[in-house]
Image (cartoon, helix red, strand yellow):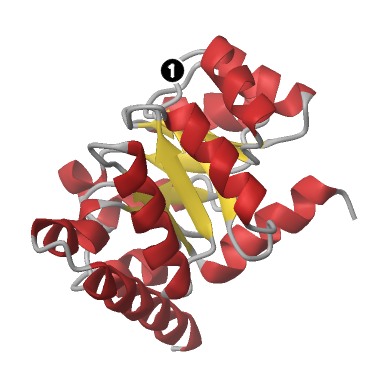
Amino acid sequence: MLKKHVHLKQILDCGIVAVVRAETPGQALKVAEAVRKGGITAIEITMTVPGAIDVIRELVSNFRPEEMLVGAGTVLDAETARLAMLAGAEFIVGPNLNPEVVRISNRYQKICMPGAMSVTEVVQAMELGADVVKIFPGSIFGPEIIKAIRGPLPQAPLMPTGGVSLDNVDRWIKAGAVAVGVGSEITKKGLQNNDYDLITETARAFVEKIRAARQQ
């Protein structure tokens, strides 16, 4: 099996990508480790993190992919995607649909998750070869958008990001999301109190709730 397929299965089996935004590289590294301890093995380092490429490189050197699959987020162009791949990123996530980002990801066989807000964009993303389509910002729509899109597009692999919380993550999964992207809902309280154990506990709670929702 191609490495890309193994990595995609890892993300989908866990059902959640942790979106790491931080004020410093050191903080990003601590958050990534705390989230990993909670059972989330797909970690998205956003390009808004200072020194994000170096953070990706360090995480890749410290963990095997099965322990922590490291990706790049908030990727707006192919140049940034390529830099992230050279640093070791195995998946590329964008808030928007940029055809060149999808193409370069496919060229180097990395997972690509472009953002979409409409049925038209979801179809365009799939036609370009996106592996998963990120529905963003999910907070505008709510879980109902997943079911609505999958009515005419039951084959669409959708991952809502933004607006996913512990209170509603089960609804997103039951609506048909193949995974969810979660950032501040995991990290905010822990970072406010410099409590990385709380981040670990919150990550674990998300993993367990997703697992339970899939079994219902």
Residue at 45% over, 24% down: 75
Kindly identify which residue carries mark 1: 76
Is disc 1 surrounded by few (<14), some (14 to 19) or many (20+) residues within 10 Å?
Answer: some
The C terminus lies in which quarter of the figure? bottom left
**Kind of residue sitting beneath label 1:** Leu
Left or right: where 166 falls relative to 182: left
Closer-to-camera residue (27/45): 27
Residue ranking furthest to the front: 26
The N terminus lies in which quarter of the figure? bottom right
Residue at 38% over, 66% down: 34
Above or below for 2 versus 216: above
Label tally? 1
Above or below for 193 versus 52: below
Left or right: where 76 falls relative to 107: left
Closer-to-camera residue (57/96): 57
- Residue 108 image offset from top left, x and y in percent: 77, 27
Above or below for 62 versus 153: below
- Residue 82 image offset from top left, x and y in percent: 63, 19
Q: Is residue 144 visible?
A: yes
When asked about the image quadrant of residue 165, the answer is: bottom left
Residue at 34% over, 71% down: 203
When asked about the image quadrant of residue 204, the answer is: bottom left
Residue ranking furthest to the right: 1
Residue at 42% over, 56% down: 32
> Which element is circle 1 on?
loop
Left or right: where 173 falls relative to 57: left
- Residue 163 image offset from top left, x and y in percent: 21, 52
- Residue 157 image offset from top left, x and y in percent: 55, 49
Closer-to-camera residue (192/66): 192
Q: Is residue 156 visible?
A: no
Above or below for 197 versus 186: below
